[in-house]
Image: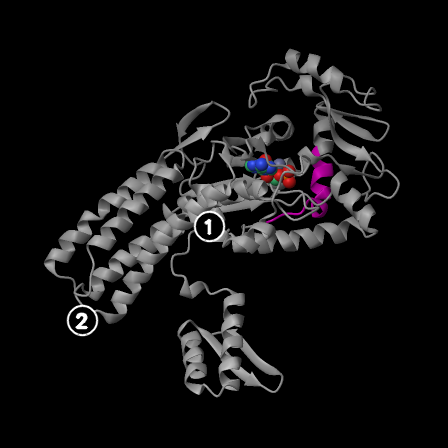
């Protein structure tokens, strides 16, 4: 399996630190609003990376944080007249709903920055002891030039940074020893959340959060560290400087970065105001379509969002879902149980679709080609099954299709994933049928729902439903 490593700017063989295991950290969102579909791109991409490792039999420890202390959160809290904690809790809950809609597997752990301050303070103290950091008036800075490898990820040269950095100096930062130094701890300002530390009350800088949370939940050395390409510099460069100086070991083996989701060829971002939230998109499209759209391009390429491409993704997804639905229908009505010799021969021919799928995914997670392999498989299914096919043959094709689609996080069995709104609409229709004394229709709806694992209970307060 090959992974493009931003550090070496080349595709490298994946060799895990520990056999059979993958330790993976993905920088998560800052939670001060609903996430937009640009933020959804790394979520979908790295969830797919994780799923492929799992498909290959690896045990994946997947850690992704929520940054729940930040200027933007504090600003939003002040605007609403509530605490920063209330804002971050609210948008973490909303983000998790969106992630469920996009069929993102829950992380092994979602650490919150505010719950890990003690560890960050310890790491900053270590950096001070080792001479990599210093305190000035309640602020702790990282001594960038002391870390000889600084710039190795972003391939930047310290002297170029120096000349660019001077212009960027903001007031209050002139107490730094060097314009390249960055903040590890900042002192409390009035009305801001703050924690006790050896340097007075304050809060951590953004970069130290990930260094500490990655270390705490995955250890000092990890296999993969990932995020959007805007995080390469300074965020990931600074994480490397902090972690490697504090721990005395190489930090992550592979650095993976997704390209931007653009709109009219400009990066979608909150600050430009050119964004759609995942929630808005979910009102227009099934989020499975959004997921399929994201995976239709290579994760490192820029991807332009458009209604046409979403429609194309919707049509492509439909072809797969319809093929799976047809297989299910044929399975339910199949006459013969066992595969014939001819069917065994046919099924063996489908190995090539699985092989092509894996070949694409092994080549730095080329999901576009992996989807093409699934389309070829769907074409094969459509032309090589009919009412005379045996149940075993149909089941084997169906299982293979479900397994490959599941690596991409695509759910092909629609009925099993009925949405709450769909269930509620059917319940309403059933109530209306009963009112019209169309009991046959009402009973039919109850039976259909039951077949999909939804149990209805007529209670005094109305109809209640639950999943069986
Ligand atoms: P933020 O909340 O801005 O820190 O972003 C959370 C994650 O989303 C990071 O990995 C960013 O790199 C990523 N991200 C933000 N905007 C985009 C975009 N337009 N396209 C792709 N990734 C993005
Ligand atoms: Zn991070």
Residue 451 spot, x, y in % from top left: 39, 74
Q: Nearer the viewer, mark 2 or mark 1?
A: 1
Front residue of 129/461: it is 461
Q: Residue at x 62, y 51 (%)?
A: 95
Q: Which mark is residue 42?
A: none
User: Within 8 Å: ligand 1 and the Cβ of disc 2?
Assistant: no
Residue 182 spot, x, y in % from top left: 72, 25
Q: Is residue 215 visible?
A: no
- Identify the residue at the far right of this view: 190
Q: Residue at x 18, y 65 (%)?
A: 390
Residue 382 spot, x, y in % from top left: 24, 54
Judging from the image, what secondary structure is the residue with disc 2 in? loop
Quarter of the view holding residue 394: bottom left
Task: Give whichever of discs 2 and 1 has the lower sequence position.
Answer: 1
State whether residue 457 is above or below residue 8: below
**Left or right side of 249 for 359:** left
**Left or right side of 247 for 61:** left
Prevailing secondary structure of the magenta residues? helix
Front residue of 341/24: it is 341
- Say which residue label 1 marks: 289
Q: Which mark is residue 335?
A: 2
Q: Around disc 1, counting alpha carbons within 10 Å, would you say few (fewer than 14), some (14 to 19), or many (20 or more)?
A: many
Front residue of 372/11: it is 372
Q: Which residues are magenta?
A: 109-123
Quarter of the view holding residue 38: top right
Q: Is residue 188 visible?
A: yes
Q: Ligand 2 is in which quadrant of the figure?
A: top right
């Amino acid at each position: 399996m090959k992974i493009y490593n931003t550090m070496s700017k080349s595709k490298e063989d994946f060799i895990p630190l520990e056999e059979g295991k993958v330790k993976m950290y993905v920088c998560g969102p800052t939670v001060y609003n609903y996430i937009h579909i640009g933020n959804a791109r790394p979520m979908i991409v790295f969830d797919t990376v994780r799923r492929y490792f799992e498909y290959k039999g690896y045990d994946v420890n997947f850690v992704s944080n929520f940054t729940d202390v930040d200027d933007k959160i504090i600003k939003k809290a002040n605007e609403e007249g509530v605490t920063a904690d209330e804002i971050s809790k609210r948008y973490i809950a909303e983000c998790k709903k969106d992630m469920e809609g996009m069929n993102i597997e829950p992380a092994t752990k979602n650490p919150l920055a505010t719950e890990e301050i003690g560890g960050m303070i310890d790491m900053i103290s270590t950096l001070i002891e080792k001479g990599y950091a210093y305190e000035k008036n309640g602020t702790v800075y990282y001594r960038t030039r002391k870390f000889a490898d600084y710039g190795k990820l972003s391939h930047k040269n310290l002297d170029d940074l120096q000349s660019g950095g001077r212009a960027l100096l903001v007031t209050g930062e002139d107490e730094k020893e060097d314009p390249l130094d960055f903040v590890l701890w900042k002192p409390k300002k009035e009305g801001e959340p703050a924690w006790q530390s050896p340097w007075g009350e304050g809060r951590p800088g953004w970069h130290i959060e990930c260094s500490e949370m990655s270390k705490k939940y995955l250890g000092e050395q990890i296999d993969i560290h990932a995020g959007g390409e805007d995080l390469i510099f300074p965020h990931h460069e600074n994480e490397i400087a902090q972690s490697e100086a504090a721990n005395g070991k190489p930090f992550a083996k592979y650095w993976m970065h997704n390209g931007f989701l653009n709109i009219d060829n400009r990066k979608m971002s909150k600050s430009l105001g050119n964004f759609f939230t995942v929630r808005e998109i979910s009102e227009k499209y099934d989020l499975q379509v959004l997921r399929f759209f994201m995976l239709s391009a290579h994760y490192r390429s820029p991807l332009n969002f458009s209604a046409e491409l979403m429609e194309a993704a919707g049509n492509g997804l439909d072809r797969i879902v319809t093929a799976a639905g047809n297989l299910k229908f044929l399975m339910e009505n199949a006459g013969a149980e066992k595969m014939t010799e001819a069917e065994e021969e046919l099924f063996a021919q489908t190995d090539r679709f699985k092989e092509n799928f894996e070949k694409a995914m092994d080549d730095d997670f080329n999901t576009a080609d992996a989807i093409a392999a699934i389309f070829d498989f769907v074409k094969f299914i459509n032309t090589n099954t009919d009412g005379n096919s045996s149940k075993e043959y149909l089941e084997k094709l169906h299982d293979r299709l479900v397994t490959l689609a599941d690596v991409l996080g695509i759910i092909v069995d629609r009925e099993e994933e009925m949405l709450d709104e769909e269930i509620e609409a059917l319940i309403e229709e059933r109530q209306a049928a009963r009112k019209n004394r169309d009991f046959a229709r009402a009973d039919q709806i109850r039976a259909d729902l039951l077949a999909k694992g939804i149990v209805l209970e007529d209670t005094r307060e109305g109809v209640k439903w639950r999943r069986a």
